[in-house]
Every structure is written in structure tokens, then in C-alpha cells.
Amino acid sequence: GTGCILTCIMGVYMACVDKADKRAQFTSAALALTTMGLAGEMADSTKGLGTYHMSFIDKLSLLTSREIVEQARFDLICR
């Protein structure tokens, strides 16, 4: 399900940061959630849940860092 997918995305982002840097860990978590949210919004939901799920996975594999930067919608809440 989606919880397992989010865990995988989170692991990918967390693997790229210093484990001692709490700010980097927080940012990685936020980016993982943002990535999953954007892929969900961009996936084709017009043909049903099965097709949507496959479209969601396809979008995850094709989502670029540029798309994430341009379409992410969140505010910085800590310093």
C-alpha cells in the first residue's frame, strides 16, 4: 500500500543526508512527503483505482527534481 511506498521514498531521501544533521533529516522527510503528494496529484485518476495505482508508480519513477521544486507547496516552519 501507500504506507510501504512512503517508507521506501523516505529511505531514499534519508540515505542521502548526514544522520547527525536533524535539520537535513527533517527536510528529507518533508521532501519525501512532497514527492509522494505530487506523484499522487499528477497520476491519472480518470480510469479507475487499478490504473491510478500504476499511473502513480509511473509518475514516481518519472518525477524530476525540477518538477518537485516548481510544484511543491509548503512553508518553512523551522529554522
Image (tube, rainbow, N blue to C red):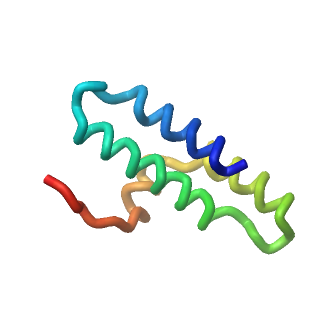
Q: Position of residue 41 (x, y in %)?
A: 60, 67
Q: x and y percent of residue 6 in the render?
A: 57, 45
Which residue appears farthest toward the left when viewing the image?
Answer: 79
Is 16 on the left or on the right of 5, as rendered?
A: left
Relative side of 78 to 14, left or right:
left
Q: Residue at 44% x, 55% y: name it.
A: 68
Count of picture labels: 0
User: Front-most of 60 and 22?
Assistant: 22
Please give the name of the residue rendered at 43% of the width and 36% of the height, measured from the top-left corner. Answer: 13
Name the spot of residue 20 as percent of width and height, x first: 24, 26
Q: x, y (%) of residue 3? A: 63, 47
Which of the 4 image quadrants contains residue 74?
Answer: bottom left
In the rendered image, the vertical position of residue 38 relative to residue 45, given as above or below: above
Q: Is residue 29 above or below residue 43?
A: above
Please tell me which residue lies in front, 70 or 31.
31
Q: Image height check: is 79 above or below 47? A: above
Name the residue located 50 percent from the left edge and 52 percent from the top edge. 35
Q: Residue at x 50, y 32 (%)?
A: 11
